[in-house]
Amino acid sequence: MAYANDLVLVGDIFAAWHEDNYPDEGKGEAFEIFCSELVMKHWDLSIHDVIQGIIGGGNDGGLDAVYTFLDKELVGIDHRALDRKNARSFDQPKITLVLIQAKQKKGFEEVAIDKVVSSCRAFLDLSKSADDLAQHFNDDVVEQIDIFRRLLRNLAAQIPSVGIEFKFTTLGSTDNVYAQISNKARILENDFASVVSGATGKVSLLGATEVLELYRERPKTAFELKVDEASKSGNGLVVLASLRDYFDFLTESEEPTGSDGTDAEPKLLSRIFEWNVRDYQGEVAVNKEIRESLVDQESAPFWWKNNGVTIVATRVNLVDKTVSVVDPQVVNGLQTSNTIFETLKDLPKGHPAFDHKILIRILMTDDEDRRDQVIRATNRQTAVTDASLYATETIQRDIEQFLLSAEWYYDRRKNFYKNAGKKVSRIVGILSLAQSLMAAGLNRPDDARARPGSVIKKDDVYRSIFDPGVPLEVYLWVVESQAAVDRELASKIQDRATRNNLRFHTLTALTILMAGRTVSSVSSLKSIAKRDNLPTDEDVKLAVVTALDAFTDYIGTSGLRGEAVAKGRDFIAHLNASSLAAVPSTAAVAITGL
C-alpha cells in the first residue's frame, strides 16, 4: 500500500508543479525538469543550471539530463578549465559526471538501461570526436557530453579523480527490481569505472517512493555551532571554535557512495557559501599554506595565523556555549572553510588537526543593504575584482525590487527564491538576464548562447548591460519578452536542441521586428521596451518563424550543425537581414534614439 499511495502523491505533486511552472511543456519534458531538479538537489543548482543540463528529445541516447562538475562547481560551456592553458592551474581535481533518465513509467525497463549502456560506450570513447557523436546524437547531448570529455583530456596531466553516476528515475517501485536490471546496472558501473584508471561508477534506481522523499526534503535553515569561547557585542558574536565543531557545522551526510550501501560520507553544505563573492581556488599557494598549518602540530596555533571567517545570519542566539544560527551565509572565508573540509574529511576523527581553533565572526541582520556592505567590506582585503561583487550593487537590488512588482523573482543571490518556495518558472538569475540583454540590446545572441559566463566577466560588457541610466522597465520588458519567446518555441518546436539554439536568436529577431531596425545598445531599448508595449502573440509568432526560417536556411547553405551556427558570429548578419525583411510596414519607421 505504501508504494501505491506514494505513486498517487507523486502524481498529484507533479501535476500541480507542471501547471504552476511549465504548463506549455509536454508532460514528458516537464517531468524531466521536475525529476532533474529533485535528483540534483544535493548539488544546490539553480533552476537555470538544471534546465541547461536537460537534453531529452530525439536522438538523446536514452538520457534526459547531463551535468559535469569540477570539484563542486558545475561546468558550463565556457568554463575556464575547458581552455587547456587555464586547466593547468587545477591541482588534484575531481571530475563528476551525472547522467539522468526520467520516465513516467511504473517500472524500470531493461530496454531503457540497455540504450544507456550502448550510448555511454560511445560517449566515453575519447577516440570519437564531437562530430562523430553528432552523427548519432542531438546537439544538446553532444554539447553536454563534450564538456566532460574535454575536461577529462585537459586535466589529464593533473591526474584527476573521476566519478560517473547514472540516476535511473521512474514511477516504479525499487522493492522488486528484476535481476536483469540489477545486472545491467552493475555492467554500467563497470563501464564507468573503466573510463580511466581509478574512476568510480555508480547507478542509482529511484522510484516513486524515492522521488517523494526527495521532494519532501527541505534545505536546512537552522544550524548549531559549539564554541569554546564567545564574546557578544550588539547583534554580533566573535567566537573561537574547534575545527571539529566547525567541520560539523559545515557538513551534512551524503547519500551512500556505492551500490552496496557503504557508509555515508560528509558533504560540504555549498549553499551556505552562495553569498561569498569568490569561488574555491583549489590547491593555490594560500590554500596549501592553510593545509600545512592544519597538519603541522609544531607550528603556532592555527587561529593565530588565519584571519578566520565571517558569517551573516538572520537570527543568532548563544546558550551555554552553543550558537544557534538561522540562514547562515559564509561571506568571507570560503578558501579557509573549503580547505578545512578537504583536509579533515580524509583524516581519522582522532587526528590532532581537529583540535585546532578557528576565529569566527557571526553577524545578525536581515537588512540586505547591511549584508551587502559586510560582503563588500570583508572582501576588499583580498584581491577580488569588482566583477565578483556585482550582486551587491545598487542596480542589481533595484532590478530585483522592480521585477518583484511584476511577480518575477530576480535571484541575484543564487537559490534565494527557490529555497523560499517561489515558482521556479518565475525565477530569473543574473546570468540568464544578462544573456537575454546581450541578445535583445547588443545584437549578440551568439555570445549569449556560447559564451555567457566569460562575456559577463568583462567589466565593460557588464557595465553596458547593467547601466544605472537605463529605465528599470527595460529589464522587465526583456524578461517578459524572453519568457514569451520560450513559451512560443515550446509550443511550436518539439526538438529541445533546436529550441535551445534559437531562444536568444529569436529574441534578437523580436527586438528587430518591434524596433524596425537592429539595436546595438541596451540604452536604445528604452524607446520600445515599456510596460505598455510588451510584444503581442502575433509579434512573438512572427519572430519564431523568422528566426527558424533563417536558421534552417543557413544550416542548409553552410552545411554546419545547428549548434555551430547558433554559436557563430557569421549567422548574425543573415538573421538581421531576415528580420528586417520581415518587419511589418507599420513598424518600419525610424524610432527616435535608436
Image: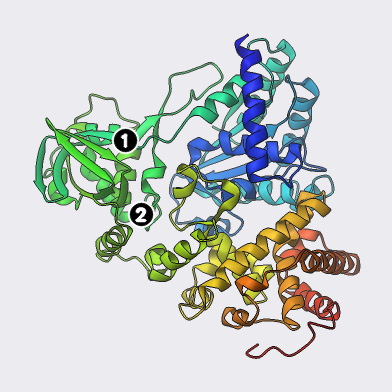
Residue 359 is situated, as x and y percent measured from the top left of the image, at 17, 46
Asked whether 369 or 443 is in front, the reply is 369
Q: Quadrant of residue 505?
A: bottom right
Q: For this view, does 165 lie left or right of residue 381?
A: right
Give the SS element for disc 2: loop
In which quadrant is the N terminus drawn? top right
Residue 461 is situated, as x and y percent measured from the top left of the image, at 53, 75
Q: CA distance from mark 1 to mark 2?
A: 19 Å
Which mark is first along the chain, 2 or 1? Answer: 1
Residue 564 is situated, as x and y percent measured from the top left of the image, at 76, 63
Residue annotated with mark 1: 222
Q: For this view, does 193 lie left or right of residue 396?
A: right
Residue annotated with mark 2: 276
Q: For this view, does 21 lie left or right of residue 275?
A: right
Asked whether 120 or 408 is in front, the reply is 408
Residue in the picture at 81% in, 49% down: 495
Q: Quadrant of residue 300?
A: top left
Residue in the picture at 45% in, 33% down: 218
- The total number of labels drawn is 2
Rendered position, 367 above or below 128: below
